[in-house]
Image (spheres, rainbow, N blue to C red):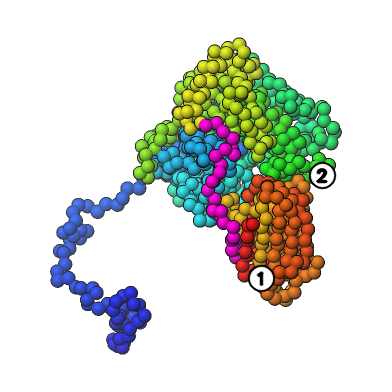
Amino acid sequence: MRLIKRQRLGFGFLGSSIAVITLGLVSIPSLAQEALPRPETYPPMVIGKTAATSGQPTWPNRVTAPQGAPNVVVILTDDVGFGSSSTFGGLVPTPNYDALAKNGARYNQFNTAAFCSPTRAALLTGRDPHNVNMGNVSNIPTAYKGYNSVIPKSAGMVSDVLRLNGYNTAAFGKWHLTPEWDQTEFGPFDRWPTGQGFEYWYGFIGGDTDQFAPSLYENTRAVAPPTNDPSYILDRDLADHAIRWIKHHQQIEPNRPFFIYYAPGSAHAPNSAPKEWLAKFRGKFDQGWDVARQQIFRRQKKMGIIPADTKLTPRPDFFPAWNSLSADRRKVYARYMEAFAAQLAYSDDQIGRVIAELRTSGQMDNTLIVFVQGDNGASAEAGLQGVMDEESVTNNNTEDFAEVLKRIDDIGGPRAQNVYPSMWAWAMGTPFQYYKQVASHFGGIRNGLVVNWPGHIEKSNVVRSQFLDVSDVMPTVLEAAGIQMPAAINGITQQPMDGSSFLYSFKNPSEPSPRHLKAYEMLQNLGVYKDGWWAGTKPIAGPWDIMKPANGALESRQWELYHVSEDYSQAKNLASVYPDKLRELQDDFFAEAGKNNILPIHNNKEGSEGRPTVSNGRSQFVFQSGMTRLLGTAAPSTIGRSYSFAADVVLPSTPANGVLVTQGGRFGGYAFYMKDGVVVFDYNTPAIKHFVIRSKEAVAPGEHTIAAEFTSDTATPGSPGTLRLLVDGKEVSSGRIDRTQTSTILDSEGFAVGEDVLTPVNDDYDISGSKFTGELIRLLVELK
């Protein structure tokens, strides 16, 4: 042993020197005796315990699920009307859904909340959506209780309860339940899936996304789809991830049950599918919506899906007859419907792959599958013409039909974000009136439900007709698992569930529902069910006007009354026949509305002032390369104002290429970039045009400040203006932008600096080659 000379090291926080003693090849630091005093005595030792402890050594208990608790898979598709799938008489083949129904339970009076986020909130929490602050989609909250989009911790989700009772939990696909101001890489994440009881999540956070270039997350980390796989599509990717998770679970935790929430987002806009699936449906809808609706109605009666005495409700007078259209319009509108059908059929095929994995791994016999076909009625949001690009709807832009006709072969593929005309939504809701958003009528809330649980369902050939609500799913799952709803979760007292279990119907298909009263509201469409009667308001606006909030005094609303225990489709309005009954149900509605946070009835602009934002009213932002996928309220808001981008750069010796800053993508947005040394700004206004301003000459290598300054004619959304390009303060080009966007800038893609990540705004560049080839020192954004 050799003593090393004592040295004073630079660790002032230790308060003393450290002596280092070398033993062979090991150096052992020894603190001064004052820092570590040696006790005079030690407690007497015995094997496994000291004098200070007693008893046998024990490990903390690992929570296990109740004996025999089943795996649970809840499947929720999107914007699929009651009459869409073959399982409920529709013209779109869904063989995997059919197979579950054949040996399961099929329900024809299952009701959702008429809109995406509210239905999802009710399904996962077991509470009415307004009671968990999700009275509207999370994109358009208001400050009123019941509508602010912040699900309270007193409304724990089924995933929370199952996880705390020994289940492994995973979610795949669409979420749409996180407040927009929490959707950044810094969260907070307590209202993301992984903060709501899911141990794993792979999917997208908002209302929809591109099937070919989706905005994906794995848990809380943004992930990019492959750019080198031309066959990539989201529905297959989600199935791949779910199958992989099931395989791994079976290998690692085969004795622990799991809960999977599988919500692919199909067939919400955009309606997309692989080429070969689009080809399967060529010509299948040339008969048009009037004939298709008749065909579906006959199939529903033949299959026993609807009562034999059901009446088919007529086409609304504001919808045109199919035969009144020109040949070109029928051609385009049929193609739109083909894309919807291909997407729904392909989604069913991929769901079938997940179910096949349950069989292959031996899990199927002990798995309860709850499959809700659609989170609301079919979507009529694209209006009477449909749209090639769904951003046209949110920005109130009218597409030129002649241009749409030229692009007909883009429908369903990666160059379009198409949605069918409203009349197809009406047809997909056969036999009911109306569509998505309309909670006052069954066309908005009635969806197909199939439950499959081998060995637990009797009389699978009987259609069950209990009046059910989506909030009934959670209590049903808990009862099937043998788990009680806890009084508190993580120390927070839980509010009562509004739903009730329908497990009784598995063995007793004709047993009546215990539900006697239920109020519905969505976007001021009001409805109430009571003991076989229904009262609802006539809609005051179409779903295609969602960005133009409707106003109408409650006292002037037209109410309708239906005896739905005898009139399944709401075909006969009895308001004038039984005015006292109507008044009774109106009173019931407002009493329930007062108890369940539905009041005040208001549009989505009232109470929206002061909405939380991450940007918090900032007028200046400084970014660096690598900031990508900045969504929603975190990005600089350029709508309805003047603004500037100034990039401090060092350009290489070869002509520079790549993106300086972008927001949005192929279907709407802007990009400030360089192409072969030339400075370019492209403002892509959906359905209008690309407004492209370019410098006349390439910029020399070296240090520069490259800027784009937009001066809006007026401080209003959509206002035109002038854009100037400057290099080192000198104008190098300018041009007019005749129409800007009015509401959102393709928020599914977000804001990015130094590169583009999902789809390009301009075909001057592609995603794989979008990184800026110079050095971007900083980007200054100023909002005027």
Q: Nearer the viewer, mark 2 or mark 1?
A: 1
Write the residue at 71% across / 56% down. 711
The segment highlighted magenta reads 600-627
Residue 383 falls in which quadrant of the image?
A: top right
Is there any visible trace of residue 401 in the rendered image?
A: yes
Write the residue at 15% across / 64% down. 44
Q: Position of residue 214 (x, y in %)?
A: 63, 50
Say which element carries label 2. helix
Q: Position of residue 64 (x, y in %)?
A: 37, 43
Q: Quadrant of the N terminus?
A: bottom left
Amino acid type for the residue under numbered disc 1:
Val
Q: Quadrant of the C terminus?
A: bottom right
Amino acid type for the residue under numbered disc 2:
Glu
Secondary structure of the magenta portion, mostly?
A: loop
Q: Earlier in the sequence, mark 2 or mark 1?
A: 2
Residue corresponding to mark 1: 649
Q: Position of residue 601 (x, y in %)?
A: 55, 31
